[in-house]
Image (cartoon, rainbow, N blue to C red):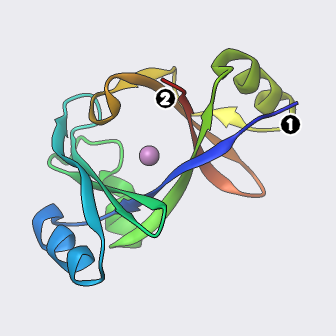
Amino acid sequence: MLTLKIHHIGYLVKKIEPAIRTFKTLGYEISQDVVRDDIRLADICFLEKDGYRIELISPFSEASVVYGLLKKYKNCPYHICYETSDFHTDCEALRAQGFLPIDAPTPAPALAGREVVFMTHAALGMIELIRTD
Ligand code: NI
């Protein structure tokens, strides 16, 4: 039985500072300041409004895993991240449901090093799974 809780919506942006300013005009507040993620080659921060958490991701290198996505989709939301207290079991359960991991689980520097993995499903596209603290 999966016990997933929505943790955040990942939002690609070309430039993170103007994006933060603009989200603030909509009433969002920063909950995690910008962190440079040297694994994903992207600047990442978290904003919150009305109980919703948004992750801004802005690649700083063309070698970033999300650079191609940004070129294709421009500024846009592109994944929903789910939190799980049983990371390994839920990974396996999702695999059995047709979700394929894109890569091996890696720590997320912008989330206190918590382990994350991205998976795709033919019917849904990409999701992210994060281990609970
Ligand atoms: Ni994310």
Quarter of the view holding residue 27: bottom left
Type of amino acid at the residue the image marks with label 1: Gln
User: Residue at horizontal 88%, vertical 30%?
Assistant: 1
Q: What is the residue that sits farthest to the left in this orientation?
A: 17
Type of amino acid at the residue the image marks with label 2: Val
99 on left or right of 108: right
Label 2 neighbour load within 10 Å: few <14, some 14-19, many 20+: many
* Res. 97 mark: 1
Q: What x and y, as percent, mark residue 39? A: 27, 28
User: Residue at horizontal 74%, vertical 38%?
Assistant: 99
Q: Is mark 2 within 8 Å of ligand 1?
A: yes
Label 1 neighbour load within 10 Å: few <14, some 14-19, many 20+: few
Q: Is mark 1 within 8 Å of ligand 1?
A: no
53 on left or right of 20: right
Q: What x and y, as percent, mark residue 38? A: 19, 30
Q: What x and y, as percent, mark residue 94? A: 78, 33
Q: Does residue 15 sit above or below 67 in this rendering? A: below
User: Residue at horizontal 15%, vertical 66%?
Assistant: 15
* Res. 116 mark: 2
* Res. 39 mark: none
Quarter of the view holding residue 95: top right
